[in-house]
Amino acid sequence: MNASVRLPNDGTGLLGEPYSRRNCPQATRDGQPAGRWIALDESGWDGDQLHGMDRSRYLTIGSVAISDEDAANLVDDLRRTTRVQAPELKFGTSFAKDGQTQRRKALVALLGPGGALEKRASVYLLDKHYFIVGKLIDLFVEEQTYKQGLDIRNTGIARKMARDLVAEGPRALGPVLFDRLLAATVAFTSYKNRDQQISVDDFYNTVEEAWARSSRRNVTRLLGLLRTTRVEAHEYLTDAFGPDASLPAALEPLIPGVAAVTANWSQRMGRVNILTDDQRALTDYHLDNIRDEARGLGHPEFRYISQDVRLGELLRGKSSDHPSLQLADLVAGAGFAVAKRHDGYITPAGEELYSVIVPLIDPAGMLSHDEPGRVAQAGIPMPTPQPR
Protein backbone atom coordinates (compact mmCIF):
# COMPACT_ATOMS: atom_id res chain seq x y z
CA MET A 1 0.00 0.00 0.00
CA ASN A 2 1.31 3.45 -0.86
CA ALA A 3 2.34 5.09 2.42
CA SER A 4 1.38 8.54 1.11
CA VAL A 5 -2.31 7.68 0.74
CA ARG A 6 -4.65 8.24 3.71
CA LEU A 7 -6.59 5.16 4.67
CA PRO A 8 -10.36 5.78 4.52
CA ASN A 9 -12.13 5.97 7.90
CA ASP A 10 -8.94 4.87 9.65
CA GLY A 11 -9.71 6.68 12.90
CA THR A 12 -6.26 8.28 13.26
CA GLY A 13 -4.14 10.97 11.65
CA LEU A 14 -1.39 8.47 10.82
CA LEU A 15 -0.85 7.26 7.29
CA GLY A 16 0.27 4.09 5.59
CA GLU A 17 0.46 0.36 6.01
CA PRO A 18 1.94 0.34 9.58
CA TYR A 19 -1.26 2.04 10.81
CA SER A 20 -3.86 0.27 8.70
CA ARG A 21 -5.56 -2.10 11.17
CA ARG A 22 -5.68 -1.14 14.84
CA ASN A 23 -7.68 2.08 14.52
CA CYS A 24 -10.78 3.19 16.40
CA PRO A 25 -12.95 5.71 14.51
CA GLN A 26 -16.04 5.17 16.71
CA ALA A 27 -16.70 6.29 20.29
CA THR A 28 -15.86 3.73 22.96
CA ARG A 29 -18.49 2.33 25.36
CA ASP A 30 -17.83 0.17 28.41
CA GLY A 31 -18.96 -3.40 27.88
CA GLN A 32 -18.65 -3.13 24.07
CA PRO A 33 -16.68 -5.36 23.76
CA ALA A 34 -16.61 -6.88 27.24
CA GLY A 35 -14.42 -5.05 29.73
CA ARG A 36 -13.63 -1.50 30.86
CA TRP A 37 -12.09 0.99 28.44
CA ILE A 38 -8.77 2.59 29.44
CA ALA A 39 -7.54 5.68 27.54
CA LEU A 40 -3.77 6.34 27.36
CA ASP A 41 -1.64 9.29 26.30
CA GLU A 42 2.01 10.23 26.88
CA SER A 43 4.13 13.26 27.63
CA GLY A 44 7.90 13.65 27.40
CA TRP A 45 8.38 11.16 24.57
CA ASP A 46 11.64 11.42 22.60
CA GLY A 47 11.52 8.11 20.78
CA ASP A 48 14.69 6.10 21.35
CA GLN A 49 16.81 9.23 21.77
CA LEU A 50 16.69 9.07 25.55
CA HIS A 51 19.71 11.09 26.59
CA GLY A 52 20.93 14.62 25.98
CA MET A 53 21.04 18.07 27.55
CA ASP A 54 17.71 19.19 26.10
CA ARG A 55 15.77 16.02 26.88
CA SER A 56 13.67 15.41 29.94
CA ARG A 57 14.77 12.57 32.17
CA TYR A 58 11.19 11.31 32.46
CA LEU A 59 8.39 9.96 30.27
CA THR A 60 4.85 9.87 31.62
CA ILE A 61 1.92 7.82 30.41
CA GLY A 62 -1.38 9.16 31.69
CA SER A 63 -4.29 6.75 31.74
CA VAL A 64 -7.93 7.05 32.68
CA ALA A 65 -10.44 4.25 33.22
CA ILE A 66 -13.25 5.82 31.24
CA SER A 67 -15.05 5.39 27.93
CA ASP A 68 -15.77 8.13 25.42
CA GLU A 69 -19.45 7.84 26.30
CA ASP A 70 -18.73 8.77 29.92
CA ALA A 71 -15.85 11.14 29.16
CA ALA A 72 -17.86 13.41 26.87
CA ASN A 73 -19.86 15.01 29.68
CA LEU A 74 -16.75 15.45 31.85
CA VAL A 75 -14.91 17.17 29.02
CA ASP A 76 -17.88 19.47 28.35
CA ASP A 77 -18.13 20.36 32.05
CA LEU A 78 -14.40 21.01 32.30
CA ARG A 79 -14.45 23.19 29.21
CA ARG A 80 -17.25 25.29 30.70
CA THR A 81 -15.54 25.55 34.07
CA THR A 82 -12.16 26.52 32.62
CA ARG A 83 -13.50 28.50 29.65
CA VAL A 84 -11.18 26.71 27.23
CA GLN A 85 -12.05 27.79 23.69
CA ALA A 86 -9.65 25.47 21.84
CA PRO A 87 -11.20 22.55 19.91
CA GLU A 88 -9.56 20.05 22.29
CA LEU A 89 -8.49 19.97 25.90
CA LYS A 90 -4.68 19.86 25.89
CA PHE A 91 -2.60 20.23 29.00
CA GLY A 92 0.29 21.95 27.21
CA THR A 93 -1.78 24.70 25.63
CA SER A 94 -4.56 25.26 28.17
CA PHE A 95 -3.28 24.20 31.62
CA ALA A 96 0.52 24.43 31.72
CA LYS A 97 1.20 28.14 31.39
CA ASP A 98 2.02 30.39 34.34
CA GLY A 99 -1.28 32.32 34.30
CA GLN A 100 -3.57 29.27 34.23
CA THR A 101 -3.82 28.62 37.96
CA GLN A 102 -7.63 28.58 38.01
CA ARG A 103 -7.71 25.95 35.29
CA ARG A 104 -5.26 23.81 37.23
CA LYS A 105 -7.49 24.09 40.29
CA ALA A 106 -10.30 22.59 38.23
CA LEU A 107 -7.98 19.74 37.26
CA VAL A 108 -7.07 19.16 40.92
CA ALA A 109 -10.77 19.00 41.77
CA LEU A 110 -11.35 16.48 38.98
CA LEU A 111 -8.51 14.15 40.02
CA GLY A 112 -8.48 14.60 43.79
CA PRO A 113 -10.64 13.21 46.59
CA GLY A 114 -14.30 13.40 45.69
CA GLY A 115 -13.53 14.26 42.06
CA ALA A 116 -15.15 12.54 39.09
CA LEU A 117 -11.88 10.77 38.24
CA GLU A 118 -10.89 9.81 41.77
CA LYS A 119 -9.33 6.31 41.65
CA ARG A 120 -9.85 6.23 37.87
CA ALA A 121 -6.63 7.94 36.78
CA SER A 122 -3.02 6.77 36.89
CA VAL A 123 0.43 8.13 35.99
CA TYR A 124 3.06 5.66 34.80
CA LEU A 125 6.43 7.31 35.35
CA LEU A 126 9.48 6.09 33.44
CA ASP A 127 13.00 7.26 34.33
CA LYS A 128 14.84 7.30 31.00
CA HIS A 129 18.27 6.94 32.63
CA TYR A 130 17.10 3.84 34.48
CA PHE A 131 15.56 2.54 31.25
CA ILE A 132 18.88 2.97 29.42
CA VAL A 133 20.79 1.16 32.14
CA GLY A 134 18.18 -1.58 32.23
CA LYS A 135 18.57 -2.08 28.49
CA LEU A 136 22.34 -2.14 28.84
CA ILE A 137 21.93 -5.14 31.13
CA ASP A 138 19.02 -6.78 29.30
CA LEU A 139 20.54 -6.69 25.84
CA PHE A 140 24.05 -7.83 26.72
CA VAL A 141 24.62 -9.17 30.25
CA GLU A 142 21.23 -10.90 30.55
CA GLU A 143 21.54 -12.38 27.06
CA GLN A 144 24.93 -13.85 27.96
CA THR A 145 23.75 -15.34 31.26
CA TYR A 146 20.60 -16.69 29.59
CA LYS A 147 22.82 -18.74 27.25
CA GLN A 148 24.58 -20.08 30.32
CA GLY A 149 21.30 -21.29 31.79
CA LEU A 150 21.16 -18.56 34.43
CA ASP A 151 18.08 -16.44 35.12
CA ILE A 152 19.13 -13.00 36.36
CA ARG A 153 15.89 -11.34 35.30
CA ASN A 154 13.19 -13.25 37.17
CA THR A 155 15.43 -13.66 40.22
CA GLY A 156 15.78 -9.88 40.59
CA ILE A 157 19.54 -9.85 39.97
CA ALA A 158 19.30 -7.80 36.77
CA ARG A 159 17.04 -5.28 38.48
CA LYS A 160 19.52 -4.89 41.35
CA MET A 161 22.34 -4.40 38.85
CA ALA A 162 20.40 -1.63 37.11
CA ARG A 163 19.51 0.08 40.37
CA ASP A 164 23.09 -0.10 41.62
CA LEU A 165 24.42 1.42 38.42
CA VAL A 166 21.90 4.28 38.44
CA ALA A 167 22.42 4.99 42.14
CA GLU A 168 26.20 4.58 42.31
CA GLY A 169 27.34 5.17 38.72
CA PRO A 170 27.65 8.98 38.86
CA ARG A 171 29.84 8.75 41.96
CA ALA A 172 31.79 5.69 40.82
CA LEU A 173 32.65 7.10 37.40
CA GLY A 174 32.10 10.82 37.89
CA PRO A 175 29.05 12.52 36.35
CA VAL A 176 30.76 13.24 33.03
CA LEU A 177 31.89 9.67 32.33
CA PHE A 178 28.60 8.23 33.57
CA ASP A 179 26.75 10.50 31.11
CA ARG A 180 29.12 9.35 28.37
CA LEU A 181 28.27 5.72 29.17
CA LEU A 182 24.55 6.49 28.87
CA ALA A 183 25.11 8.42 25.65
CA ALA A 184 27.24 5.60 24.20
CA THR A 185 24.54 3.06 25.01
CA VAL A 186 21.90 5.15 23.23
CA ALA A 187 24.15 5.83 20.25
CA PHE A 188 24.98 2.13 19.81
CA THR A 189 21.54 0.60 20.36
CA SER A 190 19.12 3.17 18.93
CA TYR A 191 17.60 3.06 15.46
CA LYS A 192 19.90 5.87 14.35
CA ASN A 193 22.70 3.28 14.37
CA ARG A 194 21.01 1.14 11.73
CA ASP A 195 23.92 1.96 9.39
CA GLN A 196 26.25 0.80 12.19
CA GLN A 197 28.36 3.94 12.21
CA ILE A 198 28.88 3.29 15.93
CA SER A 199 30.76 -0.01 16.00
CA VAL A 200 31.11 -2.60 18.73
CA ASP A 201 34.65 -1.36 19.31
CA ASP A 202 33.43 2.25 19.63
CA PHE A 203 30.92 1.25 22.27
CA TYR A 204 33.28 -0.97 24.25
CA ASN A 205 35.98 1.68 24.30
CA THR A 206 33.65 3.66 26.58
CA VAL A 207 32.83 0.53 28.60
CA GLU A 208 36.52 -0.20 29.11
CA GLU A 209 37.24 3.35 30.25
CA ALA A 210 34.32 3.24 32.67
CA TRP A 211 35.46 -0.10 34.12
CA ALA A 212 39.04 1.12 34.54
CA ARG A 213 37.96 4.29 36.36
CA SER A 214 35.19 2.85 38.53
CA SER A 215 35.70 3.45 42.24
CA ARG A 216 32.81 1.39 43.64
CA ARG A 217 32.69 -2.38 43.90
CA ASN A 218 29.14 -2.96 42.61
CA VAL A 219 29.71 -0.78 39.57
CA THR A 220 33.14 -2.29 38.84
CA ARG A 221 31.71 -5.80 39.04
CA LEU A 222 28.87 -4.99 36.64
CA LEU A 223 31.13 -3.25 34.14
CA GLY A 224 33.48 -6.23 34.37
CA LEU A 225 30.61 -8.48 33.24
CA LEU A 226 29.71 -6.03 30.49
CA ARG A 227 33.29 -6.12 29.15
CA THR A 228 32.79 -9.82 28.29
CA THR A 229 29.66 -9.34 26.15
CA ARG A 230 31.09 -8.32 22.78
CA VAL A 231 29.60 -11.44 21.16
CA GLU A 232 26.15 -10.41 22.39
CA ALA A 233 26.73 -6.88 21.09
CA HIS A 234 27.50 -8.22 17.60
CA GLU A 235 24.38 -10.40 17.82
CA TYR A 236 22.34 -7.37 18.81
CA LEU A 237 23.39 -5.46 15.69
CA THR A 238 22.26 -8.41 13.55
CA ASP A 239 18.97 -8.87 15.41
CA ALA A 240 18.16 -5.15 15.40
CA PHE A 241 19.47 -3.97 12.04
CA GLY A 242 20.41 -7.02 9.93
CA PRO A 243 18.56 -8.21 6.81
CA ASP A 244 16.34 -10.49 8.91
CA ALA A 245 15.97 -8.10 11.85
CA SER A 246 13.50 -9.37 14.43
CA LEU A 247 14.15 -7.26 17.54
CA PRO A 248 11.34 -4.71 17.86
CA ALA A 249 12.59 -1.18 18.65
CA ALA A 250 14.70 -2.21 21.62
CA LEU A 251 15.29 1.29 22.97
CA GLU A 252 11.77 2.65 22.40
CA PRO A 253 10.28 3.09 25.92
CA LEU A 254 6.71 3.77 24.86
CA ILE A 255 6.09 0.19 23.71
CA PRO A 256 6.93 -1.61 26.98
CA GLY A 257 5.37 1.35 28.79
CA VAL A 258 1.99 0.79 27.13
CA ALA A 259 2.32 -2.95 27.77
CA ALA A 260 3.04 -2.34 31.45
CA VAL A 261 0.13 0.10 31.86
CA THR A 262 -2.16 -2.44 30.20
CA ALA A 263 -1.00 -5.16 32.58
CA ASN A 264 -1.35 -2.95 35.64
CA TRP A 265 -4.94 -1.91 34.81
CA SER A 266 -5.88 -5.52 34.02
CA GLN A 267 -4.59 -6.63 37.41
CA ARG A 268 -6.82 -4.00 39.02
CA MET A 269 -9.96 -4.37 36.91
CA GLY A 270 -9.87 -7.70 35.09
CA ARG A 271 -10.59 -7.58 31.36
CA VAL A 272 -9.76 -4.20 29.81
CA ASN A 273 -9.85 -2.56 26.40
CA ILE A 274 -7.10 -0.07 25.59
CA LEU A 275 -7.36 3.08 23.47
CA THR A 276 -4.05 4.88 22.88
CA ASP A 277 -3.43 8.23 21.28
CA ASP A 278 -2.20 7.96 17.69
CA GLN A 279 1.48 8.06 18.58
CA ARG A 280 3.75 7.22 15.63
CA ALA A 281 5.75 4.66 17.63
CA LEU A 282 2.63 2.55 18.20
CA THR A 283 2.45 0.79 14.85
CA ASP A 284 0.22 -2.21 14.22
CA TYR A 285 3.33 -4.38 14.54
CA HIS A 286 4.16 -3.07 18.01
CA LEU A 287 0.56 -3.19 19.19
CA ASP A 288 0.41 -6.77 17.91
CA ASN A 289 3.44 -7.57 20.05
CA ILE A 290 1.76 -6.12 23.13
CA ARG A 291 -1.42 -8.09 22.41
CA ASP A 292 0.58 -11.29 21.84
CA GLU A 293 2.43 -10.76 25.09
CA ALA A 294 -0.89 -10.55 26.93
CA ARG A 295 -1.64 -14.00 25.50
CA GLY A 296 1.79 -15.35 26.45
CA LEU A 297 2.93 -15.44 22.83
CA GLY A 298 5.10 -12.35 22.70
CA HIS A 299 8.54 -11.69 21.28
CA PRO A 300 11.39 -12.69 23.65
CA GLU A 301 12.27 -9.01 24.09
CA PHE A 302 8.98 -8.60 25.96
CA ARG A 303 9.42 -11.57 28.28
CA TYR A 304 9.72 -9.30 31.34
CA ILE A 305 6.19 -7.88 30.91
CA SER A 306 3.50 -9.22 33.23
CA GLN A 307 1.73 -12.40 32.14
CA ASP A 308 -1.95 -13.39 32.46
CA VAL A 309 -3.24 -10.04 31.21
CA ARG A 310 -6.92 -10.01 30.26
CA LEU A 311 -6.95 -7.78 27.20
CA GLY A 312 -9.81 -7.23 24.79
CA GLU A 313 -9.29 -4.50 22.19
CA LEU A 314 -5.99 -2.64 21.75
CA LEU A 315 -6.59 0.30 19.42
CA ARG A 316 -5.42 3.83 18.62
CA GLY A 317 -7.39 6.97 17.87
CA LYS A 318 -7.27 10.74 17.45
CA SER A 319 -7.86 12.83 20.55
CA SER A 320 -10.14 15.13 18.53
CA ASP A 321 -12.50 12.16 18.09
CA HIS A 322 -12.15 10.67 21.58
CA PRO A 323 -12.85 12.76 24.71
CA SER A 324 -11.36 9.98 26.84
CA LEU A 325 -7.98 10.64 25.18
CA GLN A 326 -8.28 14.34 26.02
CA LEU A 327 -8.61 13.43 29.70
CA ALA A 328 -5.62 11.09 29.37
CA ASP A 329 -3.64 13.99 27.86
CA LEU A 330 -4.40 16.14 30.90
CA VAL A 331 -3.24 13.40 33.27
CA ALA A 332 -0.06 12.74 31.26
CA GLY A 333 0.75 16.44 30.99
CA ALA A 334 0.17 17.06 34.69
CA GLY A 335 2.32 14.05 35.51
CA PHE A 336 5.10 15.36 33.29
CA ALA A 337 5.01 18.79 34.95
CA VAL A 338 5.42 17.11 38.33
CA ALA A 339 8.21 14.84 37.04
CA LYS A 340 10.06 17.90 35.71
CA ARG A 341 9.68 19.52 39.13
CA HIS A 342 11.30 16.44 40.68
CA ASP A 343 14.11 16.80 38.14
CA GLY A 344 14.71 20.44 39.06
CA TYR A 345 12.57 22.27 36.49
CA ILE A 346 10.38 24.30 38.84
CA THR A 347 7.17 25.73 37.32
CA PRO A 348 3.86 26.93 38.75
CA ALA A 349 2.15 23.92 37.16
CA GLY A 350 4.42 21.45 38.94
CA GLU A 351 4.09 23.30 42.25
CA GLU A 352 0.29 23.42 42.10
CA LEU A 353 -0.27 19.86 40.90
CA TYR A 354 2.26 17.64 42.66
CA SER A 355 0.12 17.03 45.75
CA VAL A 356 -2.70 15.52 43.69
CA ILE A 357 -0.51 13.82 41.05
CA VAL A 358 2.03 12.01 43.25
CA PRO A 359 -0.65 9.71 44.77
CA LEU A 360 -1.61 8.71 41.21
CA ILE A 361 1.90 7.50 40.33
CA ASP A 362 1.84 3.79 39.56
CA PRO A 363 4.03 1.97 42.12
CA ALA A 364 4.89 -0.51 39.37
CA GLY A 365 6.36 2.23 37.16
CA MET A 366 9.88 2.15 35.78
CA LEU A 367 11.80 3.92 38.52
CA SER A 368 15.10 3.02 40.16
CA HIS A 369 13.37 2.68 43.56
CA ASP A 370 10.08 1.48 45.05
CA GLU A 371 8.93 4.78 46.54
CA PRO A 372 6.81 6.89 44.14
CA GLY A 373 6.29 9.31 47.03
CA ARG A 374 9.85 10.53 46.50
CA VAL A 375 8.59 12.36 43.42
CA ALA A 376 6.94 14.84 45.79
CA GLN A 377 10.45 16.13 46.50
CA ALA A 378 11.50 19.00 44.26
CA GLY A 379 14.90 18.75 42.62
CA ILE A 380 17.52 21.46 42.62
CA PRO A 381 16.23 24.24 40.32
CA MET A 382 17.96 24.38 36.97
CA PRO A 383 20.01 27.54 36.41
CA THR A 384 18.41 30.22 34.28
CA PRO A 385 20.32 30.57 30.99
CA GLN A 386 22.17 33.89 30.86
CA PRO A 387 22.17 36.00 27.69
CA ARG A 388 25.44 35.93 25.81
Image: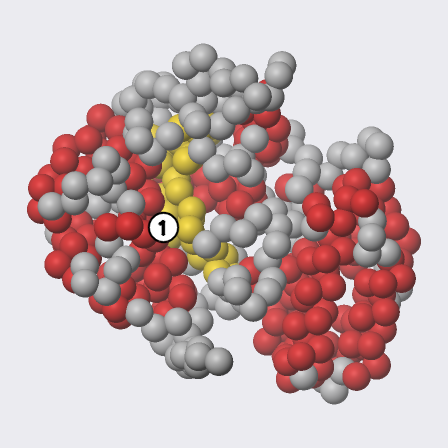
Residue at (62, 16) in percent of width and height: 2
Q: Residue furthest left?
A: 81
Task: Answer with left or right where residue 54 lies relative to residue 121.
Answer: right
Residue at (77, 44) in percent of width and height: 194
Q: Is residue 386 above or below residue 27?
A: below
Q: Position of residue 149 (x, y in %)?
A: 83, 51
The residue indicated by pointer 1 is: 332
Q: Position of residue 256 (x, y in %)?
A: 56, 44
Task: Answer with left or right where residue 323 lies relative to residue 61.
Answer: left
Name the residue nearer the viewer: 282 or 30: 282
Picture quarter with the N terminus:
top right
Name the residue nearer the viewer: 260 or 347: 347
Q: Residue furthest bottom?
A: 215
Amino acid type shown at disc 1: Ala
Task: Answer with left or right where residue 251 lies relative to residue 98.
Answer: right
Q: Position of residue 99 (x, y in %)?
A: 18, 63
Task: Answer with left or right where residue 83 lies relative to residue 374.
Answer: left
